[in-house]
Image (spheres, rainbow, N blue to C red):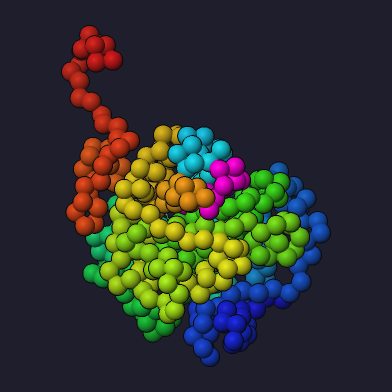
Amino acid sequence: MAELICFNADCRARYAITDVLYNCTKCGGLLEAVYGAIDACDLKRVFRERRMSNAPLDQSGVWRYRELFPFLGDYAQVTTLREGNTPLLDAPAAAEYGGLDRLTFKHQGFNPTGSFKDNGMTCGVAQARRLGMKRVACVSTGNTSASMAAYAAAAGIEALIFLPHGNISFGKLAQALEYGARTFEVEANFDQILALVRVLAERLGIYLLNSVNPFRIEGQKTIIFEMLDQRDWRAPDWIVLPGGNLGNTSAFGKALREAHALGLIDKMPRLAVIQAEGSAPFYDFMQRGGEFRAVEKPETLATAIRIGDPVSWPKALHEIRSSCGVVDKVSEQEIADAKAIIGRCGIGCEPASAATLAGLRKLTAQGVVARDADVVAVLTGNVLKDPDYIYRYHTGQLKAPDGARIESRFGNQSVVVPNDADAIARAL
Ligand code: F0G
């Protein structure tokens, strides 16, 4: 039995799982999917056996774990691009840079559209189909839109995408166009466009697939389930992730609490959420307490997390508290350098993802994370999402939003040579 329940502890209003709602109609709170008793006794074996199966649902690194988010009545409504199935990668050079003995990356950039959004989108689009929706919409800093465009196209639903004009990488915009989405570049920032899209969704009966959509959060829980499964259900000490709209923080915390309650893991890992300095409202709030205050003009070259008014902050706050977590922020220079180090491990990621390693370096230096801790950092997006940033960094042309030059400390420039073996041999 699945229901939607208001996340606000003073309200907890309940709604049918098929109600088209993103917020509680009584108090305006966020909604979450909640289930009756789940029998977890044999699940670890079932999940493992499904890796041998050729059935599309079992091959998906999301739907393989479907007993842990049983909101759908009929799995015929699922559109899968075989999302999830992302590797755990050891990265000794990044560990050393981060002040750790050992560091493992869970690389969500290996997803079909190159980011963790696919884990949630397959669920959001399945719910859209179940509800008979003909059109879906989102505002995005680029990855949600790329993912929604792909899954909507595969499902035969029309995709409407709203992007902050001038603040999205071409790789991500190109994906939306290639997957056939109707794409609008709005002259406003992410937070302003989200308010606009909510109005349009309501007025035109379009299904909203931003991370306020509780079914996206259910799908993103599987990033954690798959990581735990890959570690034979040994929970790490820390899980580190970048924070933007804070949907992933909400999903990871919910997954960990549920896995712990079901006895799938015997301890709760701690969450460490890292924000970019110019877009760090959650960090500010955790430091200062009191009312949550949005950052009016968020800035960062890590455009994926350029968000000043993250909708999921109440859930994220709960998850940070439940997991004894921490929130930190890092500078543009720190993100750029950490990103280059991840590249040198042969792994690579997009700028927002590198906030994890930059944050870890700070947290180990402060003694918050111990050198010998067992740490999994989640790389949220693929290295090819933002090639423009990479080229500028390595050629010394990258500038922070305030115009300050970012030093290319780990830069690697290409060299122009004549078509002459002797000259090239000399250069070598
Ligand atoms: N990393 C990447 C690569 C992202 O695309 C995002 C969010 C985040 C981290 C932050 O995750 O919002 O769950 O805290 N991108 C959204 C988008 C906002 O529109 O693609 P969050």
Horizontal and vertical percent for residue 196? 33, 78
Q: Is residue 81 magenta?
A: no
Horizontal and vertical percent for residue 80? 56, 56
Tell me where residue 79 sits by quadrant: bottom right
Tell me where residue 325 sits by quadrant: bottom right
Q: Which residues are magenta?
A: 368-381
Measured along the vertical axis of the image, is residue 16 above or below residue 270?
A: below
Which residue: 42% across, 80% down?
291
For residue 422, say whether it is visible: yes
In the picture, the quarter occupied by the C terminus is top left
Residue closest to the far right: 41
Horizontal and vertical percent for residue 164? 29, 65
Relative horizontal placement of residue 306, taking residue 376 as reference (left or right): left
Residue closest to the far bottom: 26
Q: Is residue 371 magenta?
A: yes
Horizontal and vertical percent for residue 270? 59, 58
Relative horizontal placement of residue 74, taking residue 400 as reference (left or right): right
253 or 292, which lies in front?
Answer: 292
